[in-house]
Image: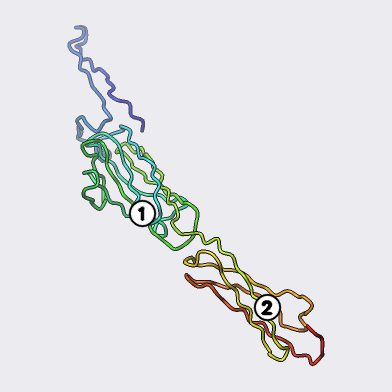
Amino acid sequence: MPYEGSETFRLRGELAGSGPLTTGTGTIVDDGTGSVYNATVTNGTPGSFTGTDDDRPITVNNVTVAEDAGHAVFNVTGNVGQMVTLQTANGTATAAGDFSSALQYSSDNGSTWQNYTSAVAIPAGGDLQVRVAIVDDADVESAESFTLLATNTGGTAATGTGTITDNEIVSNATFEVDNVTVNEGAGTLTFTVTKNGVSSVTSTVDFTTADGTATTADYTATNGTLSFGANETTKTVTVNITNDGIFEGS
């Protein structure tokens, strides 16, 4: 609900034919203060009371962190003593896979942290720090984001976006295949595929045979994918050779 500040109305009492006797002013506030009066209901079902309404606005900042930062730390800003509830929402980043939905908060500028379980008050200074644990995976991926929602007791939510940047090194690998000569009677021919570039990053490369002066009558066509683990730089591909007994030259 929108924050409206103080609003007033008047109640006037008078006796019939005698003119007004007195006037009282009622003030309605939506800042979490004021009194709550519980009436006695003799017929019907009484309404429920869940706490004083506080529509004062709150804000949440946006943060960007590297995937290996450990946590994304948000500032939830509001009025001292204002109660807020907290939760995360998936974006391109998802809970468990990219971040933890379990939250912690600090009321002393990050000196100590508490596990979040229910509504918490904005501390002195007006800033509540909230941190979200980030999952450091081995995938090479684009930046991903999620949302932290902070909701006042009036039901209005403020959102902040957490952006996670990848910390994996892109290999920019290149691959070379050696030239091999074998006798037709050898039965097989083995190529060596060499990976050049950052060897600490895993890579994959597809391969396939293609005819030259030799055709599939001279060898068995093959294809597949080579997977290079971290620090692996060579793989081999073996092709079966057909010994047809015909002199053909190279």
Q: Quadrant of the C terminus?
A: bottom right
The residue carrying mark 2 is: 222
**Residue 145 visible in image:** yes
In the rendered image, the vertical position of residue 207 relative to residue 57, given as above or below: below
Residue occupying the point 24% across, 43% down:
109
Q: Quadrant of the N terminus?
A: top left
Residue occupying the point 23% across, 51% down:
114
| Structural distance between the alpha carbons of marks 1 and 2 | 45 Å
The residue carrying mark 1 is: 69
Residue 227 horizontal side relative to residue 23, left or right? right
What's the residue type where badge 1 is placed?
Ala
State the residue in front, 52 or 62. 62
In the rendered image, the vertical position of residue 7 relative to residue 224, given as above or below: above
The spot of residue 222 in percent (x, y) is 68, 78
What's the residue type where badge 2 is placed?
Thr
The spot of residue 22 in percent (x, y) is 18, 12
Residue occupying the point 71% across, 82% down:
220
